[in-house]
Amino acid sequence: MTENQVKKRKDCDPAYQWHIKDLYASDELWEQDYEILLKEAQELASYEGRFKEGPEIFLSYMKKKEEVMKKFEAVYVYANQRYHEDTGNSFYQGLSGKAQALSVKINSAVVFEEPELVAIGKETIDKWMEESEEMELYRRYFYELFRQQEHVLSKEEEGILADVQDMSADVSNIFSMFNNADVRFPSVKGRDGEEIPVSHGRYTLLLENGDVEIRKQAFSSMYSQYGQYKNTLAALYNANLKNYAFFARRRHYDSALEMALDGGEIPTSVYTNLIDMVHENMDLMHRYVRLRKKALGVDELHMYDLYVPLAEDFEMKIPFEEAKKIVKKGLEPLGEEYGKVLSEGMDGGWIDVYENEGKRSGAYSWGAYGTHPFVLMNYQDNLNNVFTLAHEMGHSMHSYYSDKNQPYLYAGYEIFVAEVASTCNEALLMEYLLNHSEDRKEKMYLVNYFLEQFKGTLYRQTMFAEFEKITHEMVWNKEPLTAEVLCDIYYKLNQEYFGEDMVIDREIGLEWARIPHFYTPFYVYQYATGYAAAIAISRKILSGDEKAREGYFRFLSGGSSMNPIDLLRLCGVDMTTGEPVRDALKLFGELLDEMEAML
């Protein structure tokens, strides 16, 4: 076996593999629980139609459901993580398939739950709450259930909407088929005349290439294809927006945006404040563009020049054991207790560290209530992977504290806050590395890394969010959305965000046509708000704000026991104001100062 050959899993050092047996000591024990759950799903279904008998039946059902769901989480996570260890393993492919089928069976068994409770009504359930102390646990559950009742229709109308929803999902599926299976891009020619394939996965790598001709060709290759299908893609996007507007009107919302944010109890002001604050600080993005132009030494900066690293070629070889030490040091501002649990996780079998043949790509944090979280990595000895370690352990620590402090019902947390703990870890680690860097190239590399996060997450995702806001409002107001209109809106947003020092190539007006997230309306803004919140929290912690640090641990421990806005307020961060975004962008300005001084 050569040094660079990927090992089979059986040949890897078990010291760097997760302790999956902390979930199940054997496949046989997994099989036992799987069989038990098949029967218990039927037990849950037997409660259908009985809630009207009173709170005792409801409590009995909820206790049984919690017992089932805890066990199911372990069954589902074990099967899938075993499958992710080696996706070519047919036995664990089978277990994963059985777990997925079980998920459908359990969900079908409990589908009656919310409609029955809604039919019983808030007034009766309030009486249940008065009659039984045990019902107190479910106060927030019922709050969420009835909070949106004005937007719930009659049984017949809900049935019609369910049928329409099933058909409307086809729009997103059609786009996905086109984008992932059908569209093909012309290859580009390298300096030696070799053919270089272009795909979604390779596109960003090609835009990072030091050869401007390769970047330009890749850019043209990508958008030449979207340009050919722009009218079809505009019709698809328009249909998706019309679908969303239809549901928002039927459910008596004042806008598509209001419906999208209501599920997480997020005020629309959070969305509009994000856009307003970024606009107030657009001069910083324009400074970044001028800095990039200077660093690359070009007369004209084009859209295909946005991903070339600003820093000089620099490599940091960081073995995993060293990475753990760096992450521990970087997160010391979070205190001794956090550091102790972090060490237990990194040293105690939470992480599956290295790539092996057939292993799932990328990285994630996952787990089941009642056991510690798990982290999948494909660690390489570089700085990016050190940040990935800090990021995924941030997710795991969030899950650890939420599981430890919340009952099962409220242990999970909303998407709106999911990236806060992970990004806060990255920000703290970055500050540590910058403060301990004495090498100019290393410091440039680090500052460049941080600047690219701001550009890609806070500015770019906000530009996406603004595009969505404009186009959804147009559809709401019955204005036509042709390919030309969409391209014009998107082109002008790029002009506004990147400024006069950037050549806004006409092809960029087509970028809207290739963004899959636009088919999940008003989702991308959460990347920007989560990033801003994390930066704001990290700055407070680094400044020695003990109240903010204590609040941060209450946030980590909060699960979904409060809405996301109130959870972040515990840390002294109020996303209904513009302050968190403004504070984050202040740091962006400071990083620009640093990079400008080093160039």
Image (cartoon, helix red, strand yellow):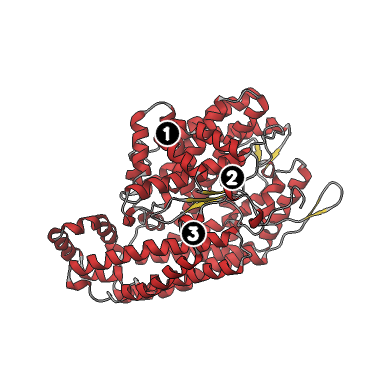
Alpha carbon separation for disc pair 1 and 2: 39 Å
- Which residue is at a point 76% across and 42% down the rendered structure image? 212
The kind of residue on which mark 3 rests is Thr
Q: Is 316 situated above or below 435?
A: below
Alpha carbon separation for disc pair 2 and 3: 22 Å
**Circle 2 SS class:** helix
Q: Estimate how packed mark 1 is, as few (under 14), some (14 to 19) or many (20 or more) residues with alpha carbons within 10 Å.
A: some
First along the sequence among labels 2 and 3: 2
Residue designated by label 2: 494
Q: Is 245 situated above or below 466?
A: below
**Circle 3 SS class:** loop
Instruction: Give the foreground label among 1 and 2.
Output: 1
Residue 530 makes an appearance in the image:
no
First along the sequence among labels 3 and 1: 1
Q: Quadrant of the rendered structure where residue 529 is?
A: top left
Residue designated by label 3: 520
Residue designated by label 1: 334
Instruction: Give the foreground label among 2 and 3.
Output: 3
First along the sequence among labels 1 and 2: 1
Q: Is residue 261 left or right of residue 449?
A: left
